[in-house]
């Protein structure tokens, strides 16, 4: 009787077996990023005659209406799933009147892109006052200088109607006022626009990672947003409560913001949310990678794709990222 050969002195299970070839790795990969999962945030400035670079966000510009249309069409042709628009008005005032003016830059831009692209993409408008107010806050101020939550809701309702009229498919409620989703939902339904959806920015943290965005929208903010955006020291419990409120008020999607520093929150929200979950890879996340890459310290393309994969792995269905167009092209290869 022949003896069986002795088992090798190491485990039979060898995880490296499935890493041996590109084909094996491709077959066993579990997480993917599709161009259609990506949403490109874009800036349009009323006073821009041509694209103006945003210094702290290399590759990002404040568009004119014409350059916006051209860039939006190119991004959609590259397979990007949606566009989120931010408007920078020529004049700001205490109530942010440019936000609900049909001739305001954001509403004109939405109308222009609706005209150019129709239903070929998902068109989103930022529904917040901070780009339009001279004090830079996301709401209107009470006489003591605090943010007047309920007066702000009236302004948001009016902005919602203007953006719906201009052609937005989804309204991005980034202002963090209590009750904003419900007020906007009722305003839309009240004029028969139950077809327009709400992308609720919840949870949204008072993050220093928004720094470069302030330059991108010529923000006039001098203080901070600590009384309305969430405290980074609060955990999953509050995040889930914010999500539950927004869903109860009628949110069609919820979004975690920022993304990379809040992947724990994203995973918890993705597990609990009954509606699709987005994540916003914000300006500071983008700027950090661009700055390190500029110095030759990291491999830019690999890092940007890895960050997107991380955000998908944590549970996001869709990702807002300033790399959306470029990543869509890289992912097609
Ligand atoms: C508010 C808004 C901000 C961002 C998106 N919407 C700024 C803020 O909350 O201070 C930041 C996005 C980014 O940093 O990329 N309208």
Image: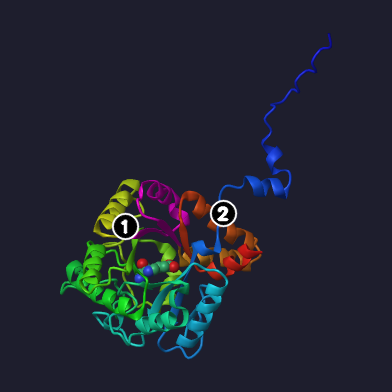
Left or right of 194 on screen, residue 301: right
Image location (x, y in percent) of residue 186: 21, 67
Which mark sits nearer the N-terminus, 1 or 2?
2
Most foreground residue, 323 or 246:
246
- Local secondary structure at mark 2: loop
Image location (x, y in percent) of residue 233: 35, 51
Outermost residue on the right side: it is 2
**Residue appearing at x 62%, y 68% in the figure:** 294
Q: Is residue 323 visible?
A: no
Outermost residue on the left side: it is 143
**Residue appearing at x 66%, y 36% in the figure:** 15
Q: Which mark is residue 90?
A: none
Q: Which mark is residue 230?
A: 1
- Local secondary structure at mark 1: loop
Q: Quadrant of residue 254?
A: bottom left
Most foreground residue, 255 or 220:
255
State ligand 1's quadrant.
bottom left
Q: Quadrant of residue 134?
A: bottom left
**Residue appearing at x 56%, y 50% in the figure:** 31
| Mark 1 or mark 2, whichever is nearer to me | 2
Outermost residue on the bottom side: it is 49
Measure how far apart labels 1 and 2 are at the Cα level: 30 Å
> Callout 2: 10 Å neighbours few (<14), some, many (20+)?
few
Most foreground residue, 28 or 264:
28
Q: Which mark is residue 32?
A: 2
The total of numbered circles placed on residues is 2
- Is residue 142 placed above or below 3 in the rendered structure? below
Left or right of 205 on screen, residue 81: right
Most foreground residue, 173 or 35:
35
Left or right of 187 on screen, residue 43: right
Does 266 appear in magenta?
Answer: yes
The magenta span reads 252-280
């Amino acid at each position: 009787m022949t003896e069986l050969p002795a088992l090798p002195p190491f485990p039979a299970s060898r995880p490296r077996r499935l890493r041996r070839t590109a084909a094996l790795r491709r077959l066993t990969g579990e997480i993917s990023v599709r161009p259609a999962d990506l949403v490109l945030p874009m800036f349009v400035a009323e006073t821009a005659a041509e694209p103006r670079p945003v210094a702290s966000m290399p590759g990002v510009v404040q568009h004119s209406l014409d350059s916006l249309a051209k860039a939006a069409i190119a991004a959609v042709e590259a397979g990007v799933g949606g566009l989120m628009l931010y408007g920078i008005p020529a004049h700001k005032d205490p109530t942010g009147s440019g936000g609900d003016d049909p001739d305001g830059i954001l509403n004109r831009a939405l109308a222009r892109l609706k005209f150019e692209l129709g239903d070929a993409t998902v068109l989103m408008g930022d529904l917040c006052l901070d780009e339009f107010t001279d004090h830079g806050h996301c709401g209107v101020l009470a006489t003591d200088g605090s943010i007047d939550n309920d007066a702000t809701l009236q302004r948001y309702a009016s902005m919602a109607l203007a953006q719906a009229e201009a052609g937005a498919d989804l309204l991005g409620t980034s202002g963090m006022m209590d009750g904003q989703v419900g007020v906007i939902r009722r305003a839309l339904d009240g004029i028969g626009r139950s077809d327009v959806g709400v992308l609720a920015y919840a949870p949204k943290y008072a993050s220093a990672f928004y720094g470069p965005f302030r330059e991108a929208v010529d923000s006039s903010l001098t203080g901070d947003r600590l009384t309305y955006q969430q405290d980074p020291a609060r955990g999953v419990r509050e995040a889930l409560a914010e999500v539950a409120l927004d869903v109860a008020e009628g949110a069609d999607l919820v979004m975690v913001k920022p993304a990379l520093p809040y992947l724990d929150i994203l995973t918890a929200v993705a597990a609990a949310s009954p509606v699709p979950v987005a994540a916003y890879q914000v300006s500071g996340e983008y700027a950090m990678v661009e700055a390190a890459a500029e110095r030759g310290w990291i491999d830019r393309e690999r890092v940007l794709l890895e960050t997107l994969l991380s955000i998908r792995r944590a549970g996001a269905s869709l990702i807002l990222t300033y790399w959306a167009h470029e990543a869509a092209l890289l992912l097609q290869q």
